[in-house]
């Protein structure tokens, strides 16, 4: 696992395309994430192939939070706990060590993501709060399912560090 670089952009864009139901960002968006937000993003490789991607950022309006934007794991990397390991590695980086909350948004029908974030909350012995953040009708004009915010915390970084090993 490592920080992404701009040259990873095409492989990340292709990985996301192979991971429905993830929303596809523009290739340019993925390049900006790799170039400007490398401290908040991570790739996992098997050989020279990118098999995992987590993008995130620290929201200026909620500086205590680390927001997980997107989690993508290739078919050959699924079922091995890779997504959770990538998120733990991101939280262990100096840029996130003072984060007190992990936040993300998930649609109601994304069972894999809910299982991931519920599992992290359980492992960290931290509550997970769920609330509507972006409503289907109000924010997406009916064109996208409601995005629910999952908020885990407060985080105990000693537990996260212990898990990193």
Image: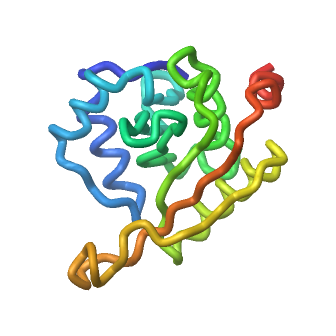
Front position in the image: 35 or 9: 35
The one nearer the camera, 98 or 2, is 98
Q: Residue at x 32, y 60 (%)?
A: 23
Compared across the picture, whether 13 is left or right of 135 comes to left
| Rendered view: 76 above or below 155 | below
Q: Nearer the viewer, residue 141 or 28?
A: 141
Q: Return the x and y of residue 59 as percentages of the image width and height.
A: 39, 39
In front of the other: 51 or 65: 65
Q: Quadrant of the N terminus?
A: top right
Residue 158 percent across, percent down from the top left: 80, 24
Residue drawn at (49%, 68%) of the image: 148
At horizontal 75% and vertical 55% (from top left) the residue drawn is 127
Render colour scheme? rainbow
- Compared to 2, does 146 lie above or below? below
Is residue 15 positioned above or below 116 on the image? above
Task: Residue 55 in the image: state x and y as whole percent.
Answer: 42, 38
Q: Residue furthest top?
A: 94
The quarter of the displayed image where residue 131 is located: bottom right
**Is 31 left or right of 12, judged from the image as shown?**
left
Q: Quadrant of the C terminus?
A: top right
In the displayed structure, does residue 109 sit left or right of residue 25? right
* Tally of numbered discs: 0
x, y percentage for residue 141? 21, 81
């Amino acid at each position: 696992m490592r920080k992404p670089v701009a040259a990873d952009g095409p492989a990340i864009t292709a990985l996301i395309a192979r991971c429905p139901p993830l929303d596809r960002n523009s290739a340019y968006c993925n390049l900006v994430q790799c170039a400007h937000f490398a401290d908040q993003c991570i790739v996992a490789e098997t050989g020279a192939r990118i098999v995992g991607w987590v993008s995130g950022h620290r929201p200026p309006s909620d500086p205590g939070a680390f927001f997980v934007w997107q989690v993508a794991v290739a078919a050959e990397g699924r079922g091995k706990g890779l997504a959770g390991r990538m998120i733990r590695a991101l939280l262990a980086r100096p840029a996130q060590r003072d984060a007190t909350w992990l936040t993300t948004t998930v649609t109601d029908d994304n069972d894999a993501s809910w299982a991931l974030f519920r599992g992290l909350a359980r492992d960290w012995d931290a509550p997970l709060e769920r609330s509507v953040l972006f409503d289907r009708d109000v924010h997406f004009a009916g064109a996208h399912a409601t995005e629910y915010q999952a908020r885990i915390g407060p985080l105990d970084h000693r537990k996260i560090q212990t898990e990193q090993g």
